[in-house]
Amino acid sequence: MQKFAIAILTLSSALISCESIAAGRPAPAVTTYEVKAKELDSHYYTIGTLKSDKATQIRTEVAGKVIDILFSPGQKVSKGETVATLDKREASALLAKLEAQLTLAKQQLQRQEQLIKNRAAPKEQLDIRLADVAGLEASIAIAKLDLGKLDIKAPFTGYIGSNTIVVGEWLNANSNIATLDATDLLTLSFAVPEKHLEVIQPGSEVSLSSVAWPGKTFTGIINYIATRVNQDRGTIDVEATIDNTEQMLRPGMSVNVSLALSKNENALLVPARSVTYQGDRATVMRIDTEGKARPVTVSIGAELEEWIEVTQGLNIGDKIVDRGRLKAKPNRPVRVLGNKGSKS
């Protein structure tokens, strides 16, 4: 019995000692944030890909020997501008021959018409001369088209790629000359979950950024929304047009896309560092009138990089623990830095 009494006395002394130490320990220092209503734009973030508004391979239509190359890699060329020339001597000679034959055929036609007028020749001969002239005119038109094919032209305005030919080289029909990309306008392709379909419309703006240009934001205009939803992913394909006249972006780039979904002018935002999570439960420490940190369960809305929207659990004017969140103990006093009247 004596040993038991001594043990109880020792335990009681220890508890009294711990309480004394706790009572003398200063409250943890924290900073607070007063909940306010702020404007919040809700966004959907995803990755998109850029492609040329127009892109093609410049190719030969006919075979021939390269006589002249009129472009440099990376050069901007206009629609219809000649970028390379093939040997025209044979085609030019054929055209000259046909034109000479046409001149002769027209002279014969005039003589035949005079004979018919004088009733010195049958009318059937006039029909033959007319057919000769018409046939030669058609042959000349074809020859001029073939001659024009020896001047290889840009099909649209854009930037020409690397040179794949040399002067004097023989090229077969459909040989590749270079690439051509129209990059003053780019097309941004990305996908949006079908639940956001009601908020995207042709003409809506979309923002994008690239690691190539830190801190720079580009703007595009949505011009296409797919007519079908991808059943495997539950998304819908969207395209936007990007003004790229400064040539800062390139086809093939992957970019970060930000699409505005809605605007809330009275959102309650709190610093992201003030929120802690346990499974699906989110809590903040609210300072009560006694200066104690009370844990409050909150419902979370939009999550930004530094801010979190609270949809339930807090009111305007509430003060919550900002910095020092891990030091604050539930239902225990805290010392608010900068507040001389805070309780400790």
Image (cartoon, rainbow, N blue to C red):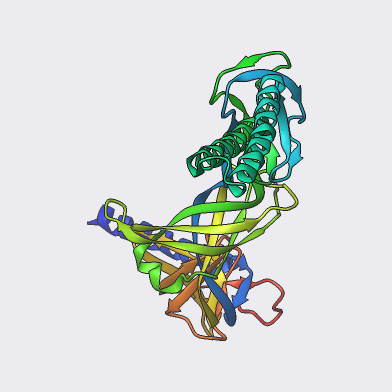
Task: Residue at 56% x, 75% y: name it.
Answer: 40
**Residue 327 appears in view:** no
Q: Residue furthest left?
A: 1
The residue nearer to you, when weighing 105 against 289, is 105
Left or right of 325, for residue 84 = right
**Number of numbered discs overlaid on the protein picture:** 0
Specify the quadrant of the image occupied by residue 115. top right
Left or right of 191, for residue 33 = right
Task: Residue at 50% x, 76% y: name it.
Answer: 286
Q: Is residue 8 above or below residue 121?
A: below
Q: Position of residue 324 (x, y in %)?
A: 59, 63
Task: Residue at 61% x, 75% y: name it.
Answer: 33
Specify the quadrant of the image occupied by residue 181. top right
Task: Residue at 44% x, 71% y: name it.
Answer: 301
User: Is the C terminus in the top left, top right, bottom left or bottom right quadrant?
Assistant: bottom right
The residue nearer to you, when weighing 172 against 96, is 96
Q: Position of residue 284 (x, y in %)?
A: 47, 70
Q: Position of residue 262 (x, y in %)?
A: 50, 75
User: Is the N terminus in the top left, top right, bottom left or bottom right quadrant?
Assistant: bottom left
Left or right of 314, for residue 270 = right
